DNA sequence: ACCTTTGTTAACAGATTTGTTAAATATAAT
DNA sequence: ATTATATTTAACAAATCTGTTAACAAAGGT
């Protein structure tokens, strides 16, 4: 059989689980349904991954790095001057979110449903965020002093960036039917939305 | 017993179900857990509400109007001039979201997990939105023509408003630990966040 | 006091779902 | 070819969860 790509069943199950978990969450997902989606019996799922829990953890592990990188991307390139850096951050963060559009909602839901599970993640984030926030705030204050931008709280600004970049993907399927032609072409809409978010943040920090 | 408020068990169950469904979603919620939270046996839950499904629908019914009103509030007061109207809309929408901070995430999740359930809601929204969008866009274009504001797409602007007003409540519990003192006082943070969102939207539409 | 309606409990039944096991088949190594 | 190892299937076991039922208790009206 020429050109017949052979993907292992183990891999098929993992991909099916991803789709199922992302849409229905841990509680809503069924091992039998995941197996069915992967085209195998559910005994196979347990053979490769033992339990639903372990299968889930595999997926969490797989995406933990993606999430961390995405959030870091919003901080932009540290070598740039702060205004450009923020512009770059908005754009880079948006692109990464767009690459995994279902990930934020999935992850937030799981964290809210079982917060104790993610204590390690928290501690890591807290220490990293503390340092980053401080240094960026310092740069902002200096730039504000020079009249290059408004003095803003970096935490508020990042919350705005996350809101603007993530939420449109969360409501995407809900909003599409009521938005007329605006979201008809997905690629086009995403580009427009990115430009809009950059514009909003740039106007927010522009000295007036 | 003076001052001893007596709340019916029927009501206690409904309130417990609300909390449970809001946090864990339909699939994650357990009728036994809801009953336990309400301080009754789970047979009582079935006695009053027959099935988990019907109990869930009661809650959906209860909040459907709230959701519709909240979204409409973002359109502001139609008698105001458009710039003030938008400012009023951001503020009013934020306040309503803040009143039911768990509602948006809950509702979006349920709609995404079972879209077929909400077809009536969709049709109603589509017809209402179509008219409202058209009239607001008309006002914006007229104001832009007079140089009072930037010409923007009302649908993009509303998506920005929804994003900024809703997302902070979705990530609230997740963000709090990493934000230092910023979110320590909830009331204060909410006021700051509202002011920030108004500022962002006003800067977005300001003529430059 | 008596009867009716409503509320409450405990025990249980049925369905669903996760997970196991043992036997059968295929694959690879020696 | 033979052995060992990996994969696959079907049947089953155990746990969980939803929903029912029958017996019992409380409240309210006549």
Image: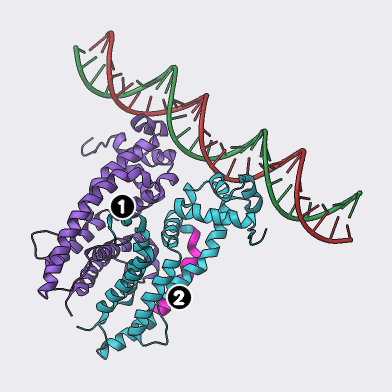
Chain colours: A purple, B cyan, C green, D red
Horizontal and vertical percent for residue A7?
A: 27, 37
> Is residue B78 something one can see in this rendering?
yes
Left or right: residue C12 versus residue A193 is right
Q: Is residue B58 above or below residue A197?
A: above
**Magenta residue span:** B117-133
Q: Is residue A194 above or below residue B72?
A: above
* Disc 1 and disc 2 on one polypeptide chain: no
Which residue in the structure is indicated by mark 1?
A103
Q: Residue pushed farthest front?
A: B2
Judge whether residue A60 is colored magenta: no
Q: Are marks 1 and 2 in contact (CB under 8 Å)?
A: no
SS under mark 2 = helix
Image quadrant occupied by the C terminus of chain B: bottom left
Instruction: Report the residue at 9% width, 74% height from top.
Output: A146
Within 10 Å of disc 1 (Cα), the crowding (few <14, some 14-19, many 20+) is many
Instruction: Report the residue at 38% width, 80% height from top.
Output: B88
SS under mark 1 = helix
């Amino acid at each position: 059989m020429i050109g017949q790509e052979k993907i292992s069943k183990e891999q098929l199950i993992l991909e099916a689980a991803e789709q199922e978990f992302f849409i229905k969450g841990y509680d809503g997902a069924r091992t039998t349904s995941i197996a069915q989606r992967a085209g195998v019996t559910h005994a196979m799922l347990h053979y490769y991954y033992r339990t639903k829990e372990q299968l889930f953890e595999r997926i969490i592990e797989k995406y933990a790095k993606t999430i961390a990188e995405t959030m870091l991307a919003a901080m932009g390139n540290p070598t740039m001057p702060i205004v450009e850096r923020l512009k770059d951050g908005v754009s880079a963060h948006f692109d990464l979110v767009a690459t995994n559009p279902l990930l934020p909602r999935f992850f937030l839901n799981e964290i809210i449903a079982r917060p104790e599970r993610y204590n390690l993640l928290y501690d890591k984030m807290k220490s990293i965020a503390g340092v980053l926030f401080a240094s960026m705030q310092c740069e902002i204050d200096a730039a504000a002093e020079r009249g290059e931008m408004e003095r803003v709280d970096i935490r508020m600004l990042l919350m705005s960036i996350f809101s603007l970049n993530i939420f449109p993907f969360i409501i995407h399927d809900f909003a599409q039917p009521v938005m007329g032609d605006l979201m008809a072409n997905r690629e086009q809409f995403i580009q427009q939305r990115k430009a809009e978010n950059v514009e909003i943040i740039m106007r927010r920090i522009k000295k007036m």
